[in-house]
Each structure stands twice: as C-alpha cells, then as structure tokens.
Image (cartoon, rainbow, N blue to C red):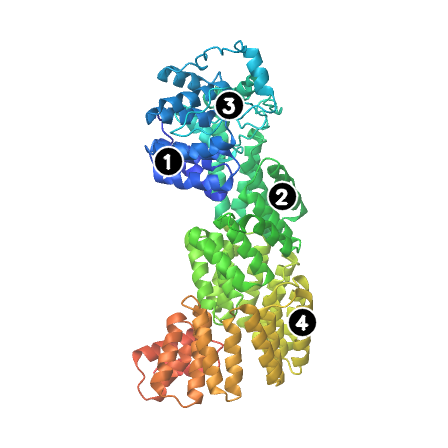
Amino acid sequence: MPTPSKPITPAELSALEHAFASDPGSDAYRPLTEAYLAAGRFMEAMVVCKKGVKAHPDDPAAKVLLARVYADQGKDRKALEELAAVLGAFPTFAAANLLAGVLHMRVGDRAAGEAALRRAAESAPDDPAIREALAKYGVAAAPPPAPPPTAAPRATAAAARATVAAPQAPAAAPVTSRQAAPAAPVERSEEVPLPTPPPTQRVQGRAYAEQLAEKYGTQAFQLPAGARDTKGGRRATLLTTVALAAVLVLTLGGWAMWNKARGARIEKVAALLKETTPLVDRDVYPAYVEAGAKAEEILKADPDSLAGHAFLAYVSAIRYAEHGDGDAARTLALQHDQAGRALGRHSHLIAAEAYLKLAAGDAAGAKETLDAVLGGENGSQSAFLTAVLGAVDLRTGDLDAARDALARAQKQNPGDARTAWLLAEQFRRRGEGYELQASGWYDYALRAEKEHVPSILGKALVLLGRGQVEEAGRAAAAVLEPRTGASKPQLALAHAIRGGVLAARGRGEEAAKEEGEAAKLDPANPDLPWLVGQRKLRGGDAAGAVEAFQRAVSLDSKRLSLYADLVRALLAKEGGTPQAIDVVKKAVARLGESPRLALLLGDAYRASGDADLARGQYEKAIALGKPFPDARVALARLYREKNNIPGALVELTQAIDEYGAGGAGGAAAAYVEKADVERARGAKREVLEDLYGKALELDPANCDALWGAGKLEHDAGKLTDRAKARLEAYAKLCPRGAHAAEAAKLGGK
C-alpha cells in the first residue's frame, strides 16, 4: 500500500506519541496508528490501535483502522473477521465495505468482494477511492439486472427505492469470506457513521505531516454523525447520499485540500505545542509563566485548540494552587477548563480541575474527578494523572496511598521531576527515619531538572531537620537568587529556612527578621509556622512550638503531618499529654478515622501511661491500614516496655515483612527496635550486629543504627575502621543526637 512521499519526521512522530501518552482515551490513537503504519512499525500500530478500540468501543471506525493494521501485515483473514463484526452492526459503512471488498478480492472470494464494493458505492457513490476500486476489479456500481419474473413485471428503480424505504425491508447481512451479501439495495439510516479513509488513501507529502501535527493537539479527531462542520460550524445531517458525500468532502477530503495559509497556521500551532510541553514538564514557576504565554499564542492562532485550552487551564491552576498567583489565575484556569471541555477530553483539563478543587479544600471532589478517569477496568493508565492523584493523597495526609500512586506514575514516566519531588515530599512528611529516601528522591528530581526549586527547598528542609545547617543555608540562598525566578511562596519558604539556619547559629534576632519576611510574602502558608515550631522544639521551647504548630494547623486543618508534630510538641510540654489526646480526638472528628490518627492517639495514650488504651489504638491502626507496619513497630515498642518480648518480636517480624524491600526507612527502624528487644532478652553481640547491619543496609543514615553498631564494636574492645566511620557519620548526620559528642570523640580515636 502506498506511503506518503515525504514521511513523517521523528519530531512529528514524537509529538504524536506524546499526545497519545498524555491522553490515551482521546482520538490521538488515530494519527499515531497511521504514522506507525506508514513507517512499517506494525507492532506499535497494533498496540496503539487496540487501545483506541478499547477506549472507543462504539466507534466502528476504530475497528476498521484495526482491520487495516492486520491487512497491512498481510493478515487478510484476521482483517475480514474484524470487518464482519463492524458490518454486522453498520452494514452500510462505506469504509468497512470498501476494505472488505478489496480483501475479499485479494483472497480470491470475488462474489463477496463484488457485493461489498457495490454496497460501498451505494453508500458513497462519489468517493474516488471506491470508484478506483470498482474500476480496478471490473465491478459495475450496480448489480447486473435479474431476469424478469414470469408472474409480474420487473420493478422500476423508483419502486425498488420505495421498497427500500419501507420499514419491513430487510437489512443487508454481514459480509464474510464465504458468503456474498444479497444484491438487493439496503436501507440507509441517519445513524450510519461517516466513512473513514480506505487503506489505499494516504495524503501525500507535507500535507500529511501537517494533518498529523494538527491532530496532535489543535482539535479532537472525531467522526461521529452530527460532528461539527469545520468551516461553518453547522451540524451535518446524513439524510441523503448527497449530504453524506458533502460531509465526506468537508471532513475527510480535507486531508488533500490544505491551502497555504492554513498549512502555515498549523505549522505555527504545532511548533508552539512542541515548545509548550517541555516547559510544563519542567515544573518550575518561570516555565509555567512561559508555557501560559505560549498557550495563549496557540489560542490566538486557533481558538478551538483543545491542547491550547488544556495547557493554559493547567498552568493557571498550578500557579493559583501552588505559586500564589491569586484569583486572576484561578479565573483563567476555570475559563479555559470550561472552554476545553466543550471541545473534548484532555488529561491536563482533568488535572486542572483536580488542583482547583484541592486548592478550594475539596480533596474528595478532586479524587472523584481523577477516579472518574483512572478508575475501573477501562480506566486511563495516564502516568500524569496518576501523579496528580498522588498529589491529592499527599495533601490529605494519606501518605501510603500517595506513595503507591506516585510509585506507579514514576515507573510509567521515570524522567518526570514533579513526580520525583512528590515522592520525596511524602517520605519527608513521614518524619524521622525517612530522611534518606526523601533526599534520594529530591536528588533524582534535581537530576531531571537541575534548578527544580521545590526539590531544592525540600532537601533543605531535610538537612535543617537533621541539623546540617550549612548545607540547608546554601540551598536557601540558591533559591533566593533572582535567576531562579522562584514564586512568592517559594521565596517565603527559603527565607524561613534561612531563619532556621540563623537560629541554629545563635543569631536569634536575624532569624526572627527572616521569618517575618517569610510571613509577609506568604501569610497563608502553613509550612512557615511549622518551621518556626520545629525550630522552637529543637531548642527546647515546647510551649512555643505548640503555639506555632497550632497556627500551622489553623492554616491547613486537613494535613495529618501537622497534627503529628503538634502532638509531639504537646507530649514534650509539661502537662501537655491530656491536650495531645484531645487534639487527636478532635482531628478524628474533623477528618474521620484513619490509621495514622489512630497511631497518634496510641502514642498519646502511651505517653499518659495507659498501656491498654494505647494498645487498642495501635491494633485499630493496624486494622485500618491493612497493612500498617508503623503501628506494629509502635505496638512492639509498647510490648518491650511491658517486658512482653515474644509479643514484640512477633510484631516486628510482621512489620519487617510488611515493609518489604522498598520500606527502607520504616524497615530500618523496625530492625533497630528488634535489636533493642533482643538486647533486652540478653542476645549475643553478633545478633545485635546483624540487626544493626540490616538496618544500615536499608538506611545508611539511620542515627540509632549508626550509634548502636559503632558502640557495639567499641564496647567489645575492637574499634575497626568501619565502626569509626559509623561513629563519624553519626556525629555528622545526627548533630542533635543524644550521643553526638561521644560519637565524635570515639570516632576520632
């Protein structure tokens, strides 16, 4: 079968692949399948087209395209099976009849081929490809006249048409390779789908590439009855053969009728789209601003560009939700989300709606928006939207669901900086024991986008929390440089981090000034009072920390990690345990039951000395989490304190199994706790060394494991180089640790 005289370029093919990957449920599968067929890449064409058939089960054109894929590979019988199913439901579908006729002729079944070609000609008599096929195979457009019946004169053509119009007229039978269809005319219906290009019809040269570029993003490629006329916006009504032919010329004949001005416009839009997509993927504020400007250029060139509306809605939603650009950005996002949805489906429209709902406090609505696309057997497999779902879960405090969704998204799209950053964020919010994993994902994001400001700030928070203030200060300074183009919330967070660094250096007045500057830039950001609370808690000011964390919770009352820090501060405050219990109970009443809230309440009861209530809450957390190994570790710690060594070991063994190979931080903590349990029952040093070693394999920066392993060797009287290195690492990575000074002394020997 002929191919375009000028094949599609790699850049154009990449654009089509990106369009399909961004929204597999759209009509982007059509031009991509065509492109793969033109390149002889049949396996890719098959995979993409089958996904198109699955996404559009009621569109017969999708199945005809799949038949073409089989036919182009020489699998004519398989192609005919696909066409038989189509023609059983749509017996007058011209494209299906044409392809069936050609294939029947090719396999030597002339009778069936002639019948199929005649039905194609009857549905679309002016189609040049059908006329060419009739001429090629020597088939008359109408069947030869039957001998006159002996009992009655032959019916006139008008009488035959009248008979066709009668309700009781029989429909044509499906065409198979072994059975010719009846020669009688068939009833037409207004529901007959528009014909699609037959396998031999390919647009030549540059026009073909331009059409593919347009389908990449400027409009949805749809061929249902009643589709909008591309010139006048009128609705096509397939009432007669003449109307069918007219619509065919307008919708499909356009493949060969691009004029110079239209081609130039399409090239401009395609070029802008190729520039916009990587800007959106960078996930930094200046790139979002530039992407929005380019999307506006696209819409000036083509107001009906689905991708133009989608990208503008998405970047505006992100700028509103994450970068503090205010109601103007929100209004712009809503406007273009609505305009885009009137044109078709696009993943970035769905993401825009989800982020707008999330920013408005409607996390449940955001999840519903995403689940409607991602859920069920026929759900989209979009890595982009799966990452958005992870972001929603992260915001609601469901860290395990966030981790699972983001891990799936990262596996599907490993080079995405935003997904890596979100993965890092959910690890950071888990707290102590997960710093290494958080840092690793921040570093991964920075390899994908070297000036990814959210990851620079996230890593600075990890460093500051561990007392590595010099590195944290350098990261904050980098964000504050004008060249980064950081948004106001990002600048505010950088000032707050710098305040924490200055406070750690004993420069309290300067620290307060930096924190005040942060509050001016972004007064509604809960991370700013959270940082103040962290600083005060580290400095031993538990009451001040409680006040700061309470302010953070008032700004974001749905973030579970803020409640966790507030409870931690209350438990550190003299007489604060009853208030901690009350805070968690109120959080449960506001947010509903969750495994992490049950774990927090268990910790509060344990601190109050009520072991029975604590155990009940830990067991509840385990039941809610299914699994929830963090709660098993907490329960094991409770058992150890009550000298229930067998019970503690059972829970820790189960927890380690539930964490699995990917549970690094949590599993490392479980191994350390198991070492403490084994020590309590008098285990040998080799057993403890093995457990600390396993913890350090999972998390080389685990403070308790570094100290435990190094101290074991010191106490045994043989301080090896490995033990010295571990003690030195403890002194460096855990400067606020209870044994920091001793570790530095022992490691320096």
Q: Amino acid at mark 3?
A: Arg
Q: Residue at x 36, y 81 (%)?
A: 689
Which residue is tagged 3? 262
Q: Which numbered tag is attached to residue 369?
A: none
Q: What whole-number distance in Å separates the C-alpha atoms at marks 4 and 3?
A: 63 Å
Q: Which numbered tag is attached to residue 78?
A: 1
Q: Amino acid at mark 1?
A: Lys
Q: Earlier in the sequence, mark 2 or mark 4?
A: 2
Marks 2 and 4 in Cβ contact (< 8 Å):
no
Q: Position of residue 642 (x, y in %)?
A: 53, 88
- Camera-nearest label, 2 or 1: 1
Query: Can I make out residue 748 in this image?
Result: no
Q: Earlier in the sequence, mark 1 or mark 3?
A: 1
Q: Position of residue 261 (x, y in %)?
A: 50, 21
Q: Earlier in the sequence, mark 4 or mark 1?
A: 1
Is 595 positioned to the left or the right of 680 in the image? right
Residue furthest to the front in view is 151
- Camera-nearest label, 2 or 4: 2
Q: Earlier in the sequence, mark 4 or mark 3?
A: 3
Q: Amino acid at mark 2?
A: Ala
Q: Earlier in the sequence, mark 3 or mark 2?
A: 3
Helix, strand or loop under label 4: helix
Helix, strand or loop under label 1: helix
Which residue is tagged 2? 333
| Image quadrant where residue 518 sits | bottom right
Which residue is tagged 4? 547
Q: Earlier in the sequence, mark 2 or mark 1?
A: 1
Front in this rendered view, residue 653 or 281: 653
Q: What whole-number distance in Å separates the C-alpha atoms at marks 2 and 1?
A: 47 Å
Marks 1 and 3 in Cβ contact (< 8 Å):
no
